[in-house]
Amino acid sequence: MGKGTLQPKTFLEEHIPQILAGLILLQPVMDIISFWQSEMGMENTLTLVLRFAILAAVAAAGFVLSDRKRVYAALGVILLVFAACHIAAILQVDAMTLPGDGEVVGFSAILLDTANLVRVAQIPIFTLCFITFLKKSGERGYQTIQKSLLAVVLLIGAVELISVITGTNPYTYANKSLGILGWFATTNAQSAVLSMTVPIVVMGAIQKETKHVFYQFAICALGFGILYFLGTRLSFAALLATAAGLTFTILVADRSKKRSIFALLICATICVGCFKWSPMYQNRLRVAENADIKQTLIDLMVESDSTWAEDHGLEGEAYRLHSISGAYSYYLGGLVEKYGLQRVADAYGYSTEVSDIASARLEKKNFCGMMMEDSPMMSHLFGLELGDMTYLDENYDLENDFHGIYMLYGWAGLLLLGAFLLYFIGLILWALMKNAKRYYTLAAGGYGIALLMGLMHAYATAGVLRRPNASVYLSIILAVIYFLIMIRNYDNSQKIEKVCPDKKEKG
């Protein structure tokens, strides 16, 4: 076949937009199924198997479609070698663990750990596959992603509304009956999903050619309303970041859309004006009140134990340890049981502040930190076993992703994932330095805000990098960023978006 002859498209190539749409729309559906499985006391085996099957199918499709199969092969080799080293590290620790130590051991624990590793590995796999899909489908694939993410936000909004009407909303903060979560099980993951998708959806509404601003107001109000009523601090930050970031982008990159600034600022101003009535603010008030009660209890326990120590003639280190023994045993019982009061006291600096010893986040960080200190060098390099973070039926898995990646997969895992994410950040910086006028568009602003919010959630919560329902959106964002910088024909894309947004490219 001659060089100038067009290659006929395969079935997969013809249906990439449909594959992308189906894959994206399946995400909230699987989340809803998982929620109701949990509500009915069922295991999440169905959705877990479905997610892994989708990952395998997408990886196979990406490999078949790719013109650079060696990249897939290289990624596969890296993941397999790392998995082998990680399993070797956890087997070494298991061989040193005694039956009465309180950790989960055995084949089931290794299987659980491997499943967790696959959840993290899906980020580069999905990203690579999405890049391949966008290379093959171009603007058609990109427009499909835009429409599918809008459909996801609309579906989530509808589910939240139905959950409130039917009284089945589980609440973002269940113990305080605050926040609208809808039929979704994990607060931090859902916060990450919405914080990443809403900026993209609002950006898409602003890009849409329409004589009426009602559509833009409606989408902006929907997106900001969902973030506001969810009630997490990061979702409120995403609301403000979307308003400020897209306003700045319009002023710098596309002043023809300056009327859209009013929709952004009016919706954001309403949310800020109602800040004191927001679930997030109300939750912070309750947290502060609970902290005062806990601090009073801690002070009473310390006072009682100090009096006992004085009455029995304890001095020096013995006096200090006994003074905090009651409070530490009450709030940090698992750590004291496993590592001893002396070591725990040293880790906390003998603090009696409620912000320290009653902090679940800090407790988990110290538990895993001391476990890593006691582990051999292989664990420092390739991580600890997920099952070892459960001790005496208490879960001490970390509450922030990047620190959790280090504990679970060591310096090697953290460096590999960090290098992967830094590649895309480097692409953004390279593009802006090369030709900011060309690459800094409304689309770039929307996806840039989405990436920032995804990374903020990974830094502050465990809701992204180890949550497949949230990390798939991060993969989409990274792939689109690659598309916007390395693949997109900007002259052609402007014609498609401004003249006929829904029209397919002509080959």
Image (cartoon, helix red, strand yellow):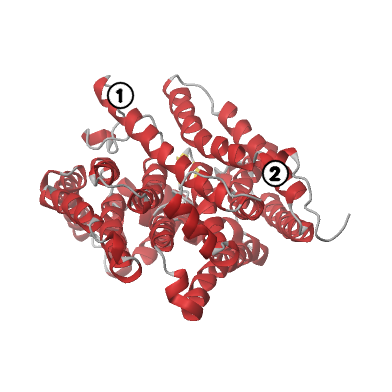
Q: Which residue sits at x=53%, y=44%? A: 468
183 vs 49, left or right, is left
Q: Which residue sits at x=59%, y=65%? A: 420
Q: Residues within 10 Å of mark 2 (few under 14, many from 20)?
A: some
Residue 398, position as x, y percentages in the image:
45, 52
- Quarter of the N terminus within the rendering: bottom right
Q: Residue furthest right?
A: 1
Q: Residues within 10 Å of mark 1 (few under 14, many from 20)?
A: some
Compare residues 415 and 371 and report the one nearer the observer.
415
Q: Earlier in the sequence, mark 1 or mark 2?
A: 2
Q: Which residue sits at x=26%, y=57%? A: 243
Q: Give amino acid for label 1.
A: Ile
Compare residues 170 and 209 and report the one nearer the observer.
209
Residue 388, position as x, y percentages in the image:
56, 48
Is residue 144 visible in this depiction of the protein?
yes
Q: Where residue 335 is drawn, which disc sits there? A: none
Q: Is residue 115 above or below residue 375?
A: above
302 vs 48, left or right, is left
* Helix, strand or loop under label 2: helix
Quote the CA–CA distance across marks 1 and 2. Answer: 38 Å
Residue 502, position as x, y percentages in the image:
48, 43
Is residue 322 visible in this depiction of the protein?
no
According to the picture, the residue beneath numbered tag 1 turns out to be 162
Q: Give amino acid for label 2.
A: Glu
According to the picture, the residue beneath numbered tag 2 turns out to be 13
Q: Residue furthest bottom?
A: 433
Q: Nearer the viewer, mark 1 or mark 2?
A: 2
* Helix, strand or loop under label 1: helix
Residue 333, position as x, y percentages in the image:
38, 47
